[in-house]
Amino acid sequence: MTFKRIGEGTVQCIVSGRDLEEYGLSFSDIMERGEKSETFIRNMLEIAQREAGFSASSPGVSMQITPMQNDSLIVTLSEGVSGGVIGLLAHIKEVLTEGLLERGIPADDAEEERALTHFKEGLLEDDLPASVRVVAFDAMGEAVSFAGAAGNTYGLKSSLYKNRDSFFLVLDKGRMSWDRFNRLTSDATEYGIVGVADEDRMAYLYEHGELLIGEKALQVLRSVGK
């Protein structure tokens, strides 16, 4: 594990696949609140305190986990957020499933609601020749169910955003065949609304959304559902 302080009260830890193997853990193991995962989190906090001066005993501790390539993780630890270490451990599965959105959640106002509704309604009007598409889900469970039923996703690139109570899965065809890509996004209509992820819509997600999973989102969501 490699630790780096990235701001006052905030430390970032890079956890490699080899680190997880040394603890006898896989990514899916961390999602289950078991003895091994709790031991791993406690050890990580102790090392962060020793090597980066992170105060694990502060009144509150927040943790954000970002899955990366090669089964590695980026773990961002922040002091002074309500919950504490015990609460963090108690809700480890929720942390991973929901992405631990501690920042930037849009205000609950009419203008934001109208913009989100307009975004979704626009998706319904699209033809789908584009190689980058977005699927809008009303709940995380719908995204997880779709990922579990998606089958082979070789060559596909995917990321997941959240805005208010909606989730947006961006699918980039990449090296996937057009036939497979079209069937995949057709199947997605059983779970959400499918449209084109054009420049304007991606700009909306960048500005108003929260990036939950930057890479291999379908694979991560599938592991959540197991």
Image: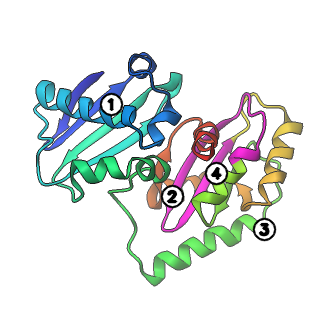
The answer to whether residue 132 is above or below residue 136 is: above
Q: Disc 1 residue type?
A: Phe
Question: What is the secondary structure assignment of the residue under circle 1?
Answer: helix
What residue is drawn where x is 41% and y is 77%? 108
Residue lying farthest to the right in this orientation: 179
Question: What is the secondary structure assignment of the residue under circle 4?
Answer: helix
Which quadrant is home to the C terminus? top right
The residue at which mark 2 appears reads as 162
Real-space Cα separation, disc 4 to disc 3, in angstroms: 25 Å
The answer to whether residue 150 is above or below residue 17 is: below
Real-space Cα separation, disc 2 to disc 4, in angstroms: 14 Å
Question: What is the secondary structure assignment of the residue under circle 3?
Answer: loop
Of tags 1 and 2, which is closer to the observer?
1
The residue at which mark 3 appears reads as 125
The residue at which mark 4 appears reads as 144
**Marked residue nearer the N-terminal end (4 or 3):** 3
